[in-house]
Every structure is written in C-alpha cells, then in structure tokens.
Amino acid sequence: MIARDDPADADITELHQLLEAYDDVLTATLTRVRDAIDVAPTSRVKNTGTILEKLERHGGSWLKSIHDLAGMRIVVDRDRNAQDALVSELIKLFGDEAREPKVIDRRESPSHGYRAVHVIVFPEDMAVEIQVRTRWQHEWADMFEKLADRVGRDIRYGQPPETEVARLLVGAADAVAGMIGAVEQIEAIDPANASLVGYRRDIAASLHRQRGLIERLV
C-alpha cells in the first residue's frame, strides 16, 4: 500500500513494476479489441504522479483496487443506442475471463457532469477500464478538462473554484452536460424527433462558446 505522505522508495519501485505489467496487459487488450470490433480506441497507463495524487485524495488505498490504472477510450460517433451496442460487444468479448466485466453507467449517475459508460474488464485478472463515450460526451469531457486545467483540477470532483468567473463557467458547463444528457435520451427513444436538429445545434453552439470563454481565462 502506498502511504499518503512521502512514499518509500520500495513502494515506488513496486508501483513501477506494477505499471509495467499493466502496460503489457493493456497493449494485448487494445489489440484484442481492435481485431474483434471495428473501432479505433486510444489507451494509457496512469503515471506515477497521477496515481499518488489519487491515493492521497482517497486517503490511501491498495493499488489493485484502482480500476483505471490501465485505461482505454472508445468514442462512438453516433447516439446512445450505438454506445449500448458497443458496450454489449465488449462484455461479450471479455465474458470468458475468470472475472466477469463490470459496467459503470455514468449516464444514469453522472459524476459532476461527466457522462460515459465504463466497462471494466479483467484480462489476466488485471483490471482494464474501457471508457465508451458518444461524440457529445467526449467533447464535453474534453472541454471540462481544459476548464479544470485553467481553474483547478478539483472541479472534476465537485470542488467549487475560487473565483466568481470560474464558478459561472462551471455552472454553464453543468448546464451543457444536462442538455447533452436530455438530448441523448430523446435520441435513444425517438431518433426521428424533429426537434433534435435544433437541440444538436444548441449543444454545438454552447460547447463552442464555452471553449472560447475558457481560452480567454488567464
């Protein structure tokens, strides 16, 4: 276990060895997904600094309880129905492992505006988190990451920023996230709804406006 403060050299060495093992498993998992499904995933293994920061934020934890040490992301350039179909394919693809895939649906329970479906799979009994996002969910997450870089990374976990301008931007981002969630629900149950064209236009305009305001922040 990594301590909250000043981890020992032995802990850091163990962490590096663990990350190397995860990197090998992630590479094999990425190839498996690409070969079986017509998608173009991106991937990453968390770096040491990010892991220590996460452990400190949660008061210390066993490393293997962190499901996103190795992560993969797939962006579906369509609606929630296509997202659900891809999630089902991933569950089937990794359903023969010793541990069954675990699904975390951040559309039904958004994390501070963040929406996606996370499929945690266990090749070689090691957790690999696969984020499945629609295009709108991905664009929103990308915009919010840029905002967090400007006003403080803790806004990703619900902490209010220090300035009034930043608070207003976070509030606006939350509103856009809610709009995306509502529109994607309509798409899922009534894809021919005539109002969707206007709603999508509103989302695109809102995201564009948010990015512009974030770029102007000092």
Image (cartoon, grey):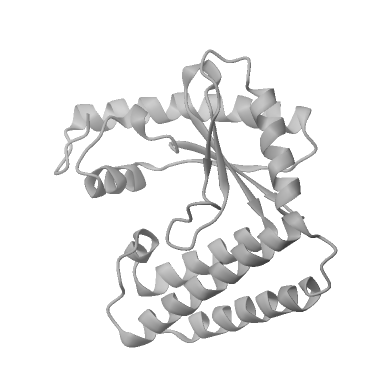
User: Which quadrant would residue 154 be assigned to in this image?
Assistant: bottom left
| Residue 175 versus residue 3 in the image, above or below | below
Q: Nearer the viewer, residue 25 or 96?
A: 96
Q: Is residue 193 left or right of residue 17?
A: right
Query: Residue at horizontal 73%, vertical 73%?
Result: 200
Residue that sits furthest to the left in the current view: 5
The correct choice, above or below, for 175 with respect to 36 in the image is below
Tell whether 32 sits left or right of 4: right
Seen from the viewer's position, the closer of residues 21 and 175 is 175
x, y (%) of residue 8?
A: 16, 33
Residue 195 image offset from top left, x and y in percent: 78, 75
Image location of residue 79, percent across then percent down: 74, 55
Task: Name above or below for residue 63 compared with residue 211.
Answer: above
Q: Position of residue 105 (x, y in %)?
A: 54, 45
Q: Nearer the viewer, residue 214 or 156?
A: 156
Where, by quadrant of the figure, is residue 178 drawn? bottom right
Q: Quadrant of the N terminus?
A: top left
Q: Quadrant of the C terminus?
A: bottom left
The residue under the point 35% across, 30% down is 65
Residue drawn at (66%, 63%), measured in percent from left and top? Answer: 136
Residue 95: image quadrant is top right
Looking at the image, residue 178 sits to the left or right of residue 75; the answer is: left
Count of picture labels? 0
